Structures are given as structure tokens and as C-alpha cells.
Image (cartoon, helix red, strand yellow):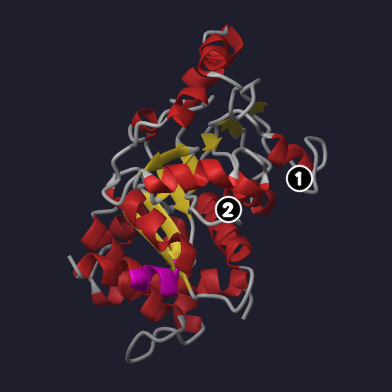
Amino acid sequence: MTNNDAFTENLLVKVAWYYYKDNLTQTEIAERLQLSRNKVVRLLERARTENIVQFHIQGHGVHCLEIERDLVSVFKLPQAFVIPTPTNNLSRSLSKAAAQYLENCISNNDLIGFGWGEAASRTIEALSIDPAFEVSMVTLTGGVNYYFHKRDYSIEGGLDKFKGGIHVIPAPFLASSERMAKNMLSEPSVENILDLASLCHHAVVGIGGLSADSTIIKEEKMTLNELLYIKNQNAVGDILGQFFDANGELLELPHHTRLIGTHLHTLKKLKNVIGVAGGPHKVEAIYGALKGGYIDTLITDEETAAALLKKEAAF
């Protein structure tokens, strides 16, 4: 089963479960899943024709659906989407799931914010937008060379899907000093993009762990010694380069004064922040992000979701 097939089956199971098991109306399902009512009707019909709906609801996505419901309940999330844990390349699978989730949410004239790093760039790569839609993208941080050079596409070849425009913070991810960062942040060209970012309808962010192979190290945004220092300050992970502890509390670090991008306090005010992360090395970071209330929609895999629920149950 491909990732696309798994996502589609999970959506079919989800719609069927809500309709036949939870007795929600088609309108209620449409509102909960951010779909049109007509699409819900089509999905229910397909679930019947493909024998997902019989005397009971069956399918590979049932267990994932149960875990999604537990995540939403336990961590008080508006939404969670859990994919079966793949045998390899979890990051790519999660980004494809994030792209498909977005495709079901996007409306004409929407503005989508993207954080820095692998999860965001791969989601952009996998994203397919209705050609009739005028959708715009805005970066949430500086240093987006990762999008344009590290991935194998250019504005003309892969980002022209954003017909409403592409808005990029014209600055690095991390300034060389606090003074330099303040100067950059006071530039109108940077201020304007950051103001725009605060208005986005959906925001896609990765959740970074503290391992030596994290993107922030691979992209040489900081050294291993700097990361070790941050870890010793009780950090468990980061979003947009801003590190927090196990309770989700943002830490006071010299590193933070040099960042160019959207502050986590601003991120928490956005309409729908989509966190894309999974794997054993990310459990502590995701947990901290959930406890801090930085995520509205979590997209992860089944094993990671189970680990998060187990961790919360231990307290």
C-alpha cells in the first residue's frame, strides 16, 4: 500500500466511523474534517462500494483513527492525523501526509506559512494545489535557501503552484549577533513579511529534536557544542529555532536573540499550526511542543503517537 493509498483509506475510515459509529451528520463531519459536504457524501459512497463499511468498519486505518482520537482528547488538540509507521523514510511519508491534509483544507485566496527545515520543504514539494486557486505562501523564518537550493526544484519548476504569490523574509535564519538581528528586524522589508506571516490561515512547522543529525546541525545553523549547551539548559526540542523544555516553556537563550523569524508567542495565535514530526528521537520534542500549546494539528506516525500517549499516561 502506498502512502497515498494509506492516507485515502484512513480518510474513508474516518468519515465512515464518524457517520456510522459516532452518528455525526454529514454536515458535522464536513466541519470537523474541513471538507465540503459533497466530498463527505462521495467518501461515504466510496466507503460502501469498497466494502470498508460492512457489518463493522474495517481497514488498516482503524487503529490509527483510534490513536488520533486519543491524541485529540488527551492533548486537547483540534485535530490529529496519524499514519501507519513506514518501514523507512518516515520524514518523507509524514510530509506527504501533511501535503494531503493541506490539500483538503486549502481554500481560494488562502495564505500558508512555512517554517524552516526539512518537514516544511518536503511538504511544499509534495503539495498539489487546485490550479483555479490563488494560494499564497509566506516564510515564517529567514534562511530559506533550504527550500530553493537543497530541494530539487526552483520557483519556476516547483513553487509556481502558489499563484497568489511567494513572500520570503529577506534575511538569514540566524544573525551573527544580537545587534545585527535587531537591525534586520527593524528593516521594513523584514517587518512587512513578518506581519504578513502573522495572518496566515495555515502554518506548517517541523519540530526539531536535539540529536546530532538534526537539520539545524546538518545545515550548520549551530554547532554541536552550542546544541549541547542548549540541551544542558533542559531543552527538549525546538520550533522555528526556538527551544523549549519538557513543559513547553520557552527557554531564555542567547541563541534566541539572534533569530530572524516568527516568535512562538505569535505562532500560538495563528489559526491552524500544523506540526509535522515523528520517530523515537522526536518524542520528547513533540511532547514539549504539545504541552506548550504550539500545535493545533499534529501529523505523526502510529508508533510515535503511541509513545506520546504512554508518556502522558505516566504522569
| Quarter in which the N terminus is drawn | bottom right
Between 207 and 196, which is closer to the camera in this rendering?
A: 207
Q: Residue at x 44, y 28 (%)?
A: 254
State which tag comes first along the sequence, 1 or 2. 1
Gap between marks 1 and 2 measured at Cα:
15 Å
- Name the residue beneath numbered marker 1: 150
Circle 1 SS class: helix
Between 183 and 39, which is closer to the camera in this rendering?
A: 183
Q: Position of residue 143 (x, y in %)?
A: 65, 31
Q: Residue at x 42, y 69 (%)?
A: 304
Q: Position of residue 290 (x, y in %)?
A: 32, 51
> Going by the image, does 240 lie left or right of 135?
left
Circle 2 SS class: loop
> Going by the image, does 142 lie left or right of 63?
right
Residue 270 falls in which quadrant of the image?
top left
Residue type of the residue flagged with mark 2 = Ser
Residue 213 falls in which quadrant of the image?
bottom right
| Quarter in which the C terminus is drawn | bottom left
Q: Position of residue 214 (x, y in %)?
A: 58, 53
Circle 2 packing at 10 Å, graded few (<14), some (14-19), many (20+), is some
Q: Residue at x 56, y 19 (%)?
A: 177
Residue type of the residue flagged with mark 1 = Lys
In the rendered image, the vertical position of residue 250 relative to residue 208, given as above or below:
above
Q: Residue furthest bottom?
A: 55
- The question of residue 3 being in magenta is answered with no
- Name the residue beneath numbered marker 2: 214
Task: Residue 205: tell me if it is visible.
Answer: no
Give, as a single range, the part of the protein colored magenta. Answer: 301-307
Single out the mark in the foreground, 1 or 2.
2
Between 22 and 250, which is closer to the camera in this rendering?
A: 250
Q: Position of residue 36 (x, y in %)?
A: 43, 52
